[in-house]
Image: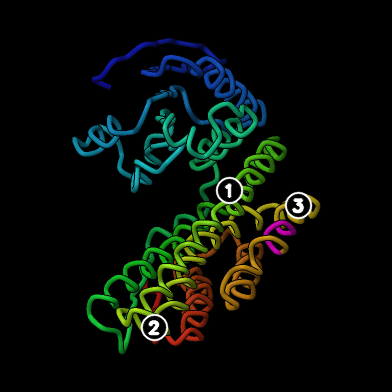
């Protein structure tokens, strides 16, 4: 990848060649072992398409960004690379190969680096992406979201619109891919790893509440100073709440779909008891309704049918925003 490579290895796993490149000093061997475990389990269950897997264990993902920019790797899913822990770049037109990147800096930040069960869950999830493709995930790529805000000052409106647009993209458009990917990983023998990984994510969500409390203090100070309206506070906090925590519905709903009620409850109960009461009042009912839509999403939807489902998700988000006085309108197109 063009910088300080410390390890290059080649492994044979049945019919698959695993190529390993790493620029980190320690910890790579354990991750390679987890990668081998994940590949073997997917191969054992059938439907494994890859003949070559390239595993890059890197201090950060700047080399990946350069590869994508040059067109040397497919761009799909490569947004916000600096914040990704693990990412699988693949070409659906060429299922014989895929490229998996592990970001040491972000793995350490999220507490995953020395937690091999969490690492197994991350790798199982990333490898499930191309394996979980179905009509609904394919249809999701043809949709887009049109968002409009009314009655907002230009600067404030642009900021809120940007936050809300990203949230709608994630929860309405990319969510089918995440839901079915998580479901496949859970039902392919990685349910304990996925539960453990998501328990860590829920614990991280609990810890992040301290940052939310500080943000609320700062916003209220600005209100007291006359530089912000009181109505802005609830709007910004609600959008921040949905951006920070709504994606956890994509993690819990696949356990609902897999009929693993105990695992779903283990995640949801902590959120409902420790997180939701500290968020804006619109959050909990919105989360519950979105989780239900994710749990009930059919796998065989054509674009027009998925558009209707995605509009339901969008309506929930926009409806919550309206309750906070934000005049938002959203139409899913495709």
Q: Is residue 212 left or right of residue 263?
A: left
**Mark 1 vs mark 3: which is more N-terminal?**
1
Q: Which mark is residue 266?
A: 3
Q: Which residue is mark 1?
A: 204
Tally of numbered discs: 3
Judging from the image, what secondary structure is the residue with disc 3 in? Answer: helix
Q: Nearer the viewer, residue 241 or 334?
A: 241
- Of 305 and 164, nearer the camera is 164
Q: SS of the residue at dot 2?
A: strand
10 Å crowding of disc 1: few (<14), some (14-19), many (20+): few
What is the magenta range?
A: 268-272
Query: Which residue extends farthest front?
Result: 225
Instruction: Evaluate if marks 2 and 3 touch, with contact meaning CB atoms under 8 Å apart.
Output: no
Residues at circles 1 and 3 in contact by the CB criterion of under 8 Å:
no
Say which quarter of the image contains residue 239. Answer: bottom left
Whole-percent x, y for residue 85 in the image: 46, 37
Disc 1 to disc 3, C-alpha distance? 15 Å
Which residue is at a point 61% across and 36% down the rendered structure image?
121
Instruction: Tell me the CA gap for discs 2 and 1.
Output: 30 Å
Q: Quadrant of residue 94?
A: top left
Residue 257 can be seen in this image: no
User: Image height check: is 317 above or below 123?
Assistant: below
Give the number of the mark in front: 1 or 3: 1
Residue under numbered circle 2: 328
Q: Position of residue 261 (x, y in %)?
A: 79, 55
């Amino acid at each position: 990848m063009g910088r300080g490579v410390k390890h290059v290895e080649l492994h044979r796993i049945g019919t698959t060649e695993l190529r390993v490149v790493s620029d980190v000093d320690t910890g790579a061997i354990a991750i390679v072992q987890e990668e081998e475990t994940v590949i073997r389990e997917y191969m054992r269950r059938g439907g494994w398409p890859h003949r070559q897997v390239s595993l890059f264990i890197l201090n950060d993902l700047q080399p990946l960004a350069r590869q994508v920019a040059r067109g040397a790797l497919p761009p799909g899913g490569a947004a916000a690379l600096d914040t990704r822990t693990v990412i699988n770049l693949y070409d659906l037109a060429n299922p014989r190969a895929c490229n998996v990147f592990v970001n040491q800096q972000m793995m350490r930040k999220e507490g995953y680096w020395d937690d091999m069960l969490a690492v197994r869950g991350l790798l199982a999830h990333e490898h499930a992406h191309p394996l979980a493709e179905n009509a609904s995930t394919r249809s999701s790529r043809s949709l887009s979201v049109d968002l409009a805000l009314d009655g907002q000052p230009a600067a404030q409106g642009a900021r809120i619109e940007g936050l809300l647009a990203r949230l709608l993209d994630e929860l309405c458009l990319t969510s089918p891919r995440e839901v079915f990917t998580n479901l496949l990983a859970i039902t392919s023998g990685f349910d304990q790893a996925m539960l453990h990984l998501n328990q860590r994510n829920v614990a991280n969500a609990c810890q992040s509440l301290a940052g939310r409390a500080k943000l609320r203090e700062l916003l209220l100070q600005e209100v007291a100073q006359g530089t912000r309206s009181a109505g802005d506070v609830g709007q910004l906090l609600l959008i921040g709440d949905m951006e920070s925590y709504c994606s956890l519905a994509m993690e819990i709903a696949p356990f609902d779909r897999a009929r693993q009620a105990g695992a779903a409850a283990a995640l949801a109960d902590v959120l409902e008891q420790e997180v939701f009461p500290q968020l804006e009042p619109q959050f909990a009912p919105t989360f519950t309704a979105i989780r239900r839509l994710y749990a009930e999403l059919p796998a065989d939807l054509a674009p027009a049918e998925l558009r209707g489902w995605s509009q339901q998700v969008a309506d929930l988000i926009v409806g919550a925003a309206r309750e906070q006085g934000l005049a938002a309108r959203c139409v899913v197109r495709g």
